[in-house]
Image: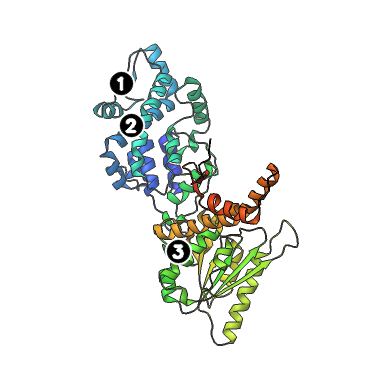
Amino acid sequence: MDDDKKASLQSFSENLPQKDAPRSKKDIVSHIAYLIGVDAKYFGLGNDGMNPQFYRTVYDKLNADKEARIVRSLCRLRTKIQRNFKAISTEMNSDVKNLDSMPDLIPPEILMTLESDGVSIVRPRKRPEDYIIDIHNYLLPHVPNCQKFMPSWVKWIYIRNLFFIPRGNTTEGNREGAKLYYEYRDLFPYQAYINWSPDERDGNILRDDAKFLPVLYERNRDKFYDMSKVTEAGDAAIDDPTEFFAEAERVLVAVDCENADPCKVIGIIKELSRLNLVKKIVKIILVDDEHTSSQWRALRRNENLPLEYYMTDRVKDDKSAVDVALTIKFYREFVQMKAEGNPIDSAVIISSDCDFWPLIELTPEVRFMVMLEYDNCSQSYYQRLQNNDVPFLYIDEYFASGNIELKTEIVLQEVIREIEEGYLSKINIFSVINRALTKLEVKMTESESANFYAKYISPMTITFAKNGSALLQNKPTLKE
């Protein structure tokens, strides 16, 4: 079976729809497929009747861009050279041919497109390995110009690295890359030669965006969670909580202090207050752990909020009881309000911990919303919320996109607290004066000490330099 048939079979088997799965977008993978040189027939071009695997509109858009055409042509050429390396070497050595005179191995259209775009790659007395290095060097300035085709929420560095073989400007680096490619060629996406660590468990990584991005991030020791950006159906993620609160009558808020960022939670609550939505909150339950941040005190100091704060003890040093305590306190509150004739109809759980899913599932009469943090939410929890139409909000994104006044207020509040309770609380100027008197064996009367403080110490102020260092200003001039 030839390479194209293998790639076609792989594409067919990997693109079979998954049962009950939300339909995934193919925008990202269509761009990637074009740039790495996947055959145009997979975009619906040609007369072989194949169902397109990628968006034709993306192909047309990128094909109209010079930088994208150059990157695609260079990648196609590099793949052709690697696929046919031995045959090309033989023709170059025995028949004294060059890349432009072996149309059965190197399609002339690739070289023609490069030439028309100002890239003259064919040189006399070049070996295949020399061309591979040349292609690497040509890609260096052109790949960055394709970043404009990727959305800002995708980490571009991960995309960029696909085009550059490690040490690709050296013969040794390309030999290592080629060795991996020859051994696992069928596991490379559509057998395109890129910087990739193949794994047979991955299958067709360009099946769709929901398949590609999690695998790509995993290869870079990272995680991609926001599947709402790559699916067309079942999207439960929301941009802000305004609509949820507008439809609610009585809202109970449960905050897992161990799995939520205090600064961001404070920011969310302040924003709800600004939008006049806090009035719908009947109670905010804060369950804390002795090992969590002291920043929660900033929220507890707000006397205008219906707060209940509970600190849990640890039976074992390595085991927190916050999730269990919060679940129990939430359910007790829910039952009590219902018994009193004032039931809640909505609830907000502020936590990235999936341990609260049973509470959501077993309380169907309450409409839930979950506020979580992008980097701390597991893939399975995200999918569970998504599949059950439970709306959730990424606190990180909402807080980051908030107005500058909100950011300023929250950050300034914490900075002042750190200075006053941390650093300045350790300084007492009268203790400093007394230590100086003792050290120098100088005595002052009470009146002299008071005058000394009023004349020399009190006028001084503390300022901060550009590097953050504390400086004394208005220091008294001493006689020389």
x%, y% of residue 29? 40, 45
Q: Which of 284 and 25 is in front in this view?
A: 284
x%, y% of residue 86? 45, 21
Q: Nearer the viewer, residue 26 or 319?
A: 319
Along the polypeptide, which appears first: circle 1 or circle 2? 2
Q: Can residue 398 be seen in this view?
A: no
The color scheme shown is rainbow
Q: Which amino acid does label 3 sit on?
A: Ala
Along the polypeptide, which appears first: circle 1 or circle 3? 1
Q: Distance between the residues labelled 3 and 2?
A: 40 Å
Please indicate whether residue 76 sits to the left or right of residue 312 in the image: left
User: Image height check: is 20 above or below 27?
Assistant: below
Q: Which residue lies furthest to the left in this view?
A: 116
Q: What residue type is labelled 1?
A: Asp
Which residue position is annotated with label 2? 73
User: Image height check: is 372 above or below 114?
Assistant: below
